[in-house]
């Protein structure tokens, strides 16, 4: 009964609330569902107790895998090929700056203040860096749609949110592989490199099976069944081997969008189902959140402060180094402050990891960051996009240096 109510809530939110908030209030919906989950969970009314949340774990893990597939659908190769290479260079560089600064600062707090060992502190520190690298693609979409135009910085922000997702997922996968729980009963446990290869292989096999069983099917119902089956298979396999379903889901989405003639129908199906699943995931995440101990306040504060500085300052430094500061403006990194659902997915995935170190504290950082940034992320993106000319082109020296157009 509770699951049916959550599904109904997710459907109604996706059908009515999201578009209304985006049009009238310029707000990316998400934080309010975290608060709702907190009120329904053990810390609130208790309508969603721990036993019920345990039963819902496969459901919101499916939502995480589905979110990964939705991210992968944004990487259509013909569009990427028409994008100047310098935009990707800037996007990856600012992502890596954020990851490195946040991971380094939080590792220092965990090792020097909390008292974790140098190696033990690396796991939650890198996970926090991966969460910090994630940014809200929806904020850019809402802002550009509200303004009714696209300028150069819109494309850069779209590229940056995509590179943010890649960096976050890859870093999360690699650190989970490095700290993977030993498997009892095997002749030889896989190495971290092999765990990464297994994770990538799950996504590639999921995409291959989609085409093997569906081919050029055009029926919307059969498309939905095939897509759902592929994502369920990919998510389940990743969970079974103790790895995150985010990267396999993203690879599955990349394969679907680039190898199927039904690209638009597949994208519409994934988006339509992803929204209600996303809001159900947020409600479950809010219910699972529990306040951290007082000694965790410093870590969360450092995470929030360093991430904000790294996002804005890193974007400015990278664009200046590539000769793009006049085109993007000094504040364009503010449009990347919004965290979005990927941050919650990473935190929730880590919270359910068996060998996680300080999972609740890491999840608290992601939880509070989403609540603090999602309410005004679209407004920041709107200000950044709106203050720049619509017709500005890439500087000649930047285009020439990038080696492409």
Image (spheres, helix red, strand yellow):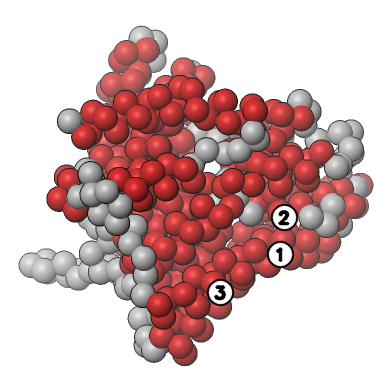
Q: Secondary structure at mark 3?
A: helix
- Quarter of image, res 389: top right
Q: Earlier in the sequence, mark 2 or mark 1?
A: 1
Quarter holding the N terminus is top left
Quadrant the C terminus occupies: top right
The residue identified by callout 1 is: 314
The image position of residue 211, as x and y in percent, is 35, 25
Q: Earlier in the sequence, mark 3 or mark 1?
A: 3
Q: How many marks?
A: 3
In this figure, which residue is indicated by the disc labeled 2? 333
Mark 3 or mark 2, earlier in chain: 3
Q: What distance separates the C-alpha of mark 2 from that of mark 1?
A: 8 Å
Pinpoint residue 356: horizontal percent, then vertical percent: 30, 68
Horizontal side of 242 relative to 112 (left or right) equals left
Residue drawn where x is 37% and y is 70% of the image: 292
Q: Please name whichever residue, 309 or 153, is drawn nearer the observer in this view of the structure.
A: 309
Observer able to see residue 88: no
Label 2: few (<14), some (14–19) or many (≥20) C-alpha neighbours in 10 Å: many
In the rendered view, tell whether residue 118 sits above or below residue 377: below
Q: Disc 3 designates what residue?
A: 302
The picture quadrant where one finds residue 353 is: bottom left
Q: Are marks 2 and 1 in contact (CB under 8 Å)?
A: yes
- Can residue 133 be seen in the rendering of this structure? yes
**Residue sticking out furthest to the left:** 185
Neighbor class of circle 1 (other Cα within 10 Å; few <14, some 14-19, many 20+) is: many
């Amino acid at each position: 009964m509770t699951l049916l109510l959550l599904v109904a809530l997710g459907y109604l939110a996706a059908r009515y609330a999201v578009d209304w908030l985006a049009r009238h209030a310029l707000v990316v919906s998400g934080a309010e569902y975290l608060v709702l989950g907190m009120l329904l969970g053990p810390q609130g009314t208790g309508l969603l107790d721990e036993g019920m949340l345990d039963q819902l774990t496969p459901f919101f893990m499916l939502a995480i895998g589905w979110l990964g597939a939705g991210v992968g659908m944004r990487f259509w190769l013909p569009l990427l090929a028409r994008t100047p290479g310098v935009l990707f260079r800037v996007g990856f560089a600012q992502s890596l700056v954020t990851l490195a600064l946040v991971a380094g600062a939080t590792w220092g707090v965990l090792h020097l203040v909390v008292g974790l060992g140098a190696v033990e502190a690396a796991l939650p520190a890198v996970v926090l860096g991966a969460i910090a690298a994630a940014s809200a693609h929806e904020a850019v979409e809402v802002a550009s749609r509200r303004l009714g135009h696209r300028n150069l910085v819109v494309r850069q922000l779209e590229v940056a949110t995509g590179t943010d997702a890649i960096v976050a997922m890859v870093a999360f996968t690699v650190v989970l592989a490095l700290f993977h729980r030993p498997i009892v009963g095997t002749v030889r446990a896989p190495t971290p490199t092999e765990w990464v290869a297994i994770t990538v292989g799950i996504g590639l096999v999921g995409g291959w099976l989609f085409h093997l069983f569906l081919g050029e099917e055009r029926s919307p119902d059969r498309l939905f069944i095939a897509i759902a089956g592929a994502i369920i298979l990919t998510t389940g396999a990743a969970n079974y081997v103790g790895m995150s379903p985010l990267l396999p889901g993203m690879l599955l989405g990349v394969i679907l969008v680039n190898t199927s003639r039904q690209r638009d129908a597949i994208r519409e199906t994934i988006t339509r189902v992803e929204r209600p699943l996303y809001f159900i995931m947020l409600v479950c995440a809010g219910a699972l959140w529990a306040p951290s101990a007082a000694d965790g306040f410093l870590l969360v504060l450092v995470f929030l402060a360093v991430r904000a500085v790294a996002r804005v300052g890193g974007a400015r430094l990278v664009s200046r180094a590539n000769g793009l500061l006049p085109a993007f403006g000094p504040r364009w990194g503010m449009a990347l402050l919004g965290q979005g659902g990927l941050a919650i997915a990473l935190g929730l995935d880590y919270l359910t990891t068996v060998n996680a170190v300080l999972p609740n504290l890491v999840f608290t950082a992601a939880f509070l960051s989403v609540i603090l940034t999602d309410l005004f992320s679209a407004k920041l993106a709107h200000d950044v996009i709106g203050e720049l000319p619509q017709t500005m082109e890439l500087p000649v020296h930047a285009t020439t240096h990038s080696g492409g157009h």
